[in-house]
Amino acid sequence: MFNQAKVPNVWVITDGGLESTLQAMALGKQLAGSNQLSNTFKLKTATSSERLQMLPAILQKYLIDWSASRYRGKLSKSRKLPWYLSSKEPLLSEDDLSPDYIITSGQKAIPAGLHLSKSNTSRKTFTVHVGYPGIPFINFDQVVLPKYEANAKMAALGPLAKQKNGIITPAPLLDLFTETDQTLTKMIPESFKQNFSSVVIGGHSSICRWYSEDAVSLSNNIKRMITRLGDHVVIIFTDRTPELVKSRMTKQILEDTNTNIKSSVFIWDTTKEPATTINKLKLYENIIQHSQRVILTADLDYACAHAVSKKYSSTN
């Protein structure tokens, strides 16, 4: 337990993605000693700009090192974002205290974390990246990633033994606490409240390839869940879901001649959600916890572990 007189200031910076935010918040809550955001525990959403994303990750790092020197010592004064960062939500606010810890997750959030840590000269900020960063670990004070991810991705950075400041965990970081959110009861139709299943959709990746044709096949399986099991289904499009997959699945389901299928499906696109990142996260966790069953595409490795932890913990 943290001494209340010495509660650290913790900033969690993510790209707004479900998986990256969930695992970063799992660590942030432990460091902050709280499940609730506060003046000393902040969640910030920021990504690299489209222009910066055109460069390799290591070049992005060097460019930020050079550019951040102009902002050094101005972290609490400058509210304008540099050209290499993008954020839909305010990155800095008037009540922000200089952070003791900056936790980043998601490769697009790394530039924001590097910028804020290098701009801060009022105190030493300890930086932690959760997940595979794509650049040498030495650029952070600590990197935390699960063993399965280290085994699959570390070859690009060389032997794991050379990454001295890495913590390899047997399983991904998980947070078993779920805050009740009344938004869920207002969002889904009344008929869904008795029981429903969730289908979480990811996207194509180098280690898990699937295409729009597979999306059509998945839509047909969802229809079978409705017609044969009498199920209601909440489909969740994540930040990883391509627009083509979204349109194919939506068309396949909503244009079906069976009216029962249309009334038994609710589609939630998290990327078009106007709510803040933290409210989107609360809603997602409540959907998972209240689902009768959860189906996820295989590319969502962390979301799969997260769903298992939520369903298991809610039955004990």
Image (cartoon, rainbow, N blue to C red):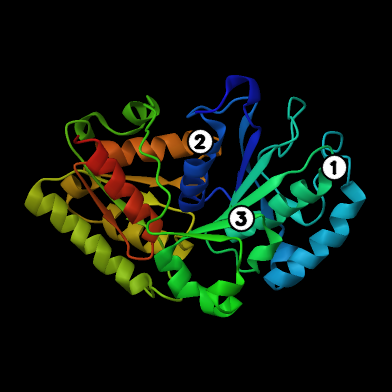
Instruction: Indicate left or right for 117 with 248 as reference.
Output: right
Gap in Å between the C-alphas at discs 3 and 1?
Answer: 19 Å
Do labels 2 and 3 touch, CB within 8 Å?
no
- Observer-nearest residue: 33 or 281? 33
Q: Is residue 313 left or right of residue 179?
A: left
Q: Amino acid at mark 3?
A: Gln
Name of the residue lying farthest toward the right: 70
The type of residue carrying mark 1 is Thr
- Could you tell me residue 84's position as x and y percent? 77, 57
Q: Which residue is tagged 3?
A: 142
| SS at mark 1 in the image | loop
Query: At which x and y percent is residue 244?
Result: 44, 65
Mark linked to residue 221: none
* Residue at x 54% of width, y 64% of height: 132
The residue at 27%/32% (across/down) is 189
Residue 190: name its quadrant.
top left
Instruction: Estimate the x, y position of residue 314 in percent, counting from the top left.
Output: 24, 35
Can residue 274 be spotted in the picture? no
Q: Earlier in the sequence, mark 2 or mark 3?
A: 2
* Mark sitting earlier along the chain (3/1): 1
Q: Residue at x 55, y 78 (%)?
A: 159
240 lies above or below 41: below
The residue identified by callout 2 is 29
Q: In the picture, which quadrant includes the C terminus?
A: top left
Nearer to the camera, 220 or 120: 120
Q: Residue at x 79, y 39 (%)?
A: 123
Q: Is residue 79 shown to the viewer in this render?
A: yes
Which element is circle 3 on? Answer: strand
Question: Which residue position is annotated with label 1?
Answer: 121
Report how far apart the C-alphas of labels 1 and 2 lie in the structure: 25 Å
